[in-house]
Image (tube, helix red, strand yellow):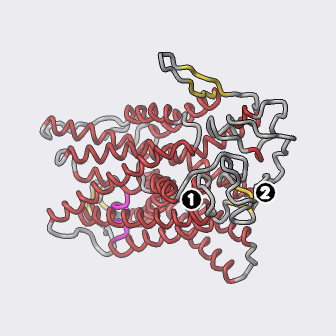
Amino acid sequence: MLPRSRTLPTRIHDSTLDPDRDARRYLQVEAQPITSKIDEDAPAVENTTTGGSKCFDDDGRLKRTGTVWTASSHIITAVIGSGVLSLAWAIAQLGWLAGPAVMALFAFVIFFTSNLLADCYRTGDLATGRRNYTYMDAVRANLGGAKVKVCGAIQYLNLFGVAVGYTIAASISMMAIKRSNCFHASGGKDPCHMSSNMYMIIFGIVQVFFSQIPDFDQVWWLSIVAAIMSFTYSIIGLSLGIAQVAQNKAFQGSIMGISVGAVTKAGTVTPMQKIWRNLQALGDIAFAYSYSIILIEIQDTLRSPPPETRTMRKATLVSISITTAFYLLCGCAGYAAFGDDAPGNLLTGFGFYNPYWLLDIANLAIVVHLVGAYQVYSQPLFAFVEKWAARRWPKVEEYDLRLHGPNGHACRVNAFRLVWRTCFVVLTTIVSMLLPFFNDVVGILGALGFWPLTVYFPVEMYIAHRKIRRWSTPWVGLQALSLACLVVSLAAAVGSIAGVVLDLKSYHPFRSTY
């Protein structure tokens, strides 16, 4: 892999060092003694003394500084994303009884499997074993074989899909700001229809610049800002929902959710559509909780002692508890306010005219949050491709780009990173313009990524890591959980794909208007 930053050493155990090159080229600090080549398939040289040295961790890299709070901010940034906006719609399909129950059930499953996955960060001893830097490294160390390739394909396809979903969501929020101001200026006389393409392009241009941040470790500040923004728009959505309930002087909705024959903005609900809507709601809720695919990368930023697993368990408990409380409040408040007419994006249900300034703040917070969330999800994919490129073209180096002026500084620029990450952003932007179906895309992503990445691989890795015997009680329980989640994922995928098929009947590429 390419150097994680200008100051972090390379992952020594994953690459072969050239003894003829100055070690400072790798470490960017005082030269460390390097006596021989290190085979990339050999186990990492771990320093079993607690904490390594004052400057380096036990794997030769500079001291990690992550804490419970930085890890929690990463998780909250990843979890409380655009998915929270679709939860009122999801509860509207399932009803007051099943909606909150399903949400709480997903929260428990995510919490449980995240703890299983956290135990797989190190191979062997939880405190001194070899580190697995990425989700795929953990799969390779614990399962190996063809499962590594299957996992990689699913994980990175899902990360790409999340980037597409966030681009769509950001463009919707940017358009909402423009339309609310247009409504305010015209007094509601102008329908203010507009295309989302320009706003997707604007978001893509912003991401081109932020995507040049070399590594996950250097995105911590963006994650904290994004986490604050997620709370901002969630609180605004919750407050507006409560205000709408107070204005209605009654709670909308029913025990069983939207009923067959109900007339909505999308038309009359048929028995088959009721089934598809219920299944798609499962996918939306699964997507809202999905972050396991970047858990190992987040855990790799934590300092030790204490062992990273212990810290990650605390961060998972804190973040899942906070997000679940927010999800229940926002989803239930939105359903209580709008009932069967709950929109796919909660904030659009309040209209564009009053209070337009508050909605502008909420939508701006969404855009800022999605800028950070896009990076949190994209960095593991960036790192994977760049690691492969570094092995294939080892002579690609970073260059100093001088900024002229009296206090000019130099920044490191890698040609491959610049081209590859820019192409990635361009591709996600084009796909977003081709498929601007927010709710359906969210449902498909949640359905396809939930079972394999959140349940199956963590369960299988934990069984292998802890050497749990076949047909023992723990083994049977874990396999039953995996099978149940597989059924839920397949059902959600079917419902979401059916939604896309319906949308495509009235869709024209690159001509989406709102």
Residue at the top extreme, as displayed? 405
Q: Residue at x 38, y 63 (%)?
A: 327
Tell me if residue 237 comes above or below residue 167 in the rendering. below
Q: Residue at x 59, y 66 (%)?
A: 310
Q: Does residue 388 show up magenta in the picture?
A: no
Q: Amino acid at mark 2?
A: Gly
Quadrant of res 150: bottom right
Q: CA distance from mark 2 to mark 1?
A: 21 Å
Residue placed under numbered mark 2 in the picture: 145
Q: Is residue 55 left or right of residue 269?
A: right
Residue placed under numbered mark 1 in the picture: 292
In this picture, which residue range is highlighted in magenta? 86-95
Residue at the left extreme, as displayed? 187
**Residue situated in front as seen by the camera: 207 or 220:** 220
Instruction: Let me know if residue 497 appears in the view.
Output: no
**Residue situated in front as seen by the camera: 141 or 400:** 400
Instruction: For mark 1, give the secondary structure.
Output: helix
Q: Position of residue 506 (x, y in %)?
A: 38, 44
Residue at the front extreme, as displayed? 54
Q: Quadrant of the C terminus?
A: top left
Dot 2 or dot 1, earlier in sequence: 2
Instruction: Let me know if residue 70 appears in the view.
Output: yes
Q: Position of residue 104 (x, y in %)?
A: 43, 71
